[in-house]
Image (cartoon, rainbow, N blue to C red):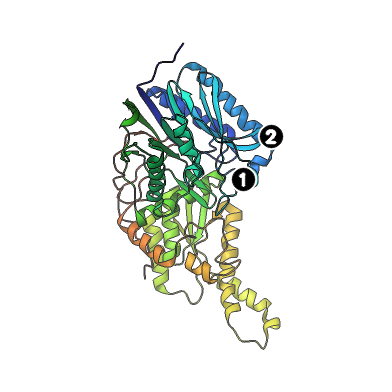
Amino acid sequence: MTQAVAQTLRIALAQLNPIVGDVAGNLALAREARKTAAQQGAELIVFSELFLSGYPPEDLVLKPAFLKSCWRALEALVEDSKDGGPGIIIGLPRQSDKGRHNSAAIVDGGKILSLRDKIDLPNYGEFDEKRVFDEGEMPGPVNFRGVRIGVPICEEIWNDLGVCETLAESGAELLIVPNGSPYHRGKVDVRHQVALRQVIESGLPLIFVNQLGGQDELVFDGASFGFNADKTLAFQMPEFETALCLTEWQRQGETWVCTDGPVAAIPEQEEADYRACLLGFRDYVNKNGFKSVVLGLSGGIDSAVCAAIAVDALGAERVRTVMLPYRYTSEDSFKDAADCATALGCRYDIVPIMEPVEGFLSALSDMFEGTEEGITEENLQSRTRGTILMAISNKFGAMVVTTGNKSEMSVGYATLYGDMNGGFNPIKDLYKMQVYAIAEWRNRNVPHGGAGAGRRGDPGKHHCQGAIRRTAAEPDRPGFAAALSGAR
């Protein structure tokens, strides 16, 4: 019996924040999203690359037990799909007879319709997939409820291996691309150009579903989107936010056209950089189980920006700041640090370092006798501050925040075991002038989704279900502009 040709297709796009290694948690997240998508009337829900394992899973995929856990999670979703609800496209690592693969499973009606194994394995920059995965075979389209869908996986649309062209030639009508594409400034425009090239070459509409969230030094910004075959933007999901969005597609002649989808404003420049720093910092702290953070607040701009990011990410009640003055600390520094902590509403303590520094100098006096004072004695101040901050961390379980900018780190203007101490540096990829720029932006704005004080900006209009998260959304806070000290 010939299957009827579908004329419409409702596709839900799950731009969510999986945790690497938390297969059970990622499965629960996928199930919750599918349940919501079913309530919206979706026929298909699409997740990002390697969603069940979290991305990038790195050496976890070398463990057979981990691969089996991911496969069991897929089997659970296959069982769920017997309910007649939305079909599923979801990424996972898997072991086959031919090797270990970065795969996408297409599931519907209690069956695995297809398993797509990624061919183009990136092996540059932050990616090292060739080390842990084996290449798959050139794919064909999958018949999903009367629609022939091609599923390239991330890198396969970024290079010229001909995956999209092959899918088009073998009858695909729509390209759906699971991605794990990390952020850098201007990355959304780059992705649009990459996708448009494939749309032009294949003649097919394309859906790009990207991961959201921080994973160690990487920040995945979401901003999923789609293009129609005529090169017009079909929809745009928000950046730096978890979202579940429903898109509606209609067959018009031989082409599928998006007739309804979200249109979200994309932040630019300083706002985008700040929100990337915030998201990466928040996820590092929360995913690693830290209840609070502590940082040295000097009165300078670097520590002030880090304090603002910490408060925006976690809430003032989870941030502790400490002024660590020495004999050379100016009254302006005291005032700037206190004003910054007051504006942000976080705890502020003062721990003088005169006695411990003098103690170190006294202990070393015989060894240093006859030498001139210089960089060694200066570095003792920084290392004393680092020791005190680490003691506070050990006592109260608060992660130490490192506050050096990229300009300092790149030229070695930093002290080992001193201001380089800490678990995470939210401004490690910002040069000094960029720190000034985002400080100026933050003084005028509060980032959407931030937990800090001030005016909440308009995030733009989009038609997406509120975040599917493991934790409740942060409440809005009453407004005033948080003053970042030390902008000089």
Q: Residue furthest top?
A: 1
Residue 58 is tagged as: 1
Q: Residue furthest bottom?
A: 370
Q: Is residue 415 left or right of residue 331?
A: right
Q: Secondary structure at mark 1?
A: helix
Residue 468 seen by the camera: no
Asked if residue 302 is positioned above or below residue 109 in the image, the reply reads below
The quarter in which the C terminus is drawn is bottom left
Q: Position of residue 341 (x, y in %)?
A: 41, 59
Amino acid, disc 2: Ala
Residue under numbered circle 2: 65
Asked if residue 208 is positioned above or below residue 364 in the image, the reply reads above
Decide which of 198, 109 is in the foreground and name it.
Answer: 198
- Residue drawn at point x = 61 percent, y = 66 percent: 417
Q: Is residue 130 left or right of residue 44?
A: right
Residue 199 seen by the camera: yes
Mark 1 is surrounded, within 10 Å at the Cα level, by few (under 14), some (14 to 19) or many (20 or more) other residues, namely: some
Amino acid, disc 1: Glu
Decide which of 269, 446 is in the foreground and name it.
Answer: 269
Q: Position of residue 85 (x, y in %)?
A: 45, 20
Q: Position of residue 384 (x, y in %)?
A: 59, 68
The answer to which quarter of the image holds residue 431 is bottom left
Question: In whole angstroms, how far apart are the C-alphas of marks 1 and 2?
Answer: 15 Å
Q: Is residue 115 left or right of residue 263?
A: right
The answer to which quarter of the image holds residue 114 is top right
Q: Which callout, 1 or 2, points at the residue further toward the start of the chain?
A: 1
Asked if residue 250 is positioned above or below residue 136 in the image, the reply reads above
Q: Secondary structure at mark 2?
A: helix
Decide which of 388, 352 is in the foreground and name it.
Answer: 388
Q: Position of residue 37 (x, y in %)?
A: 41, 26
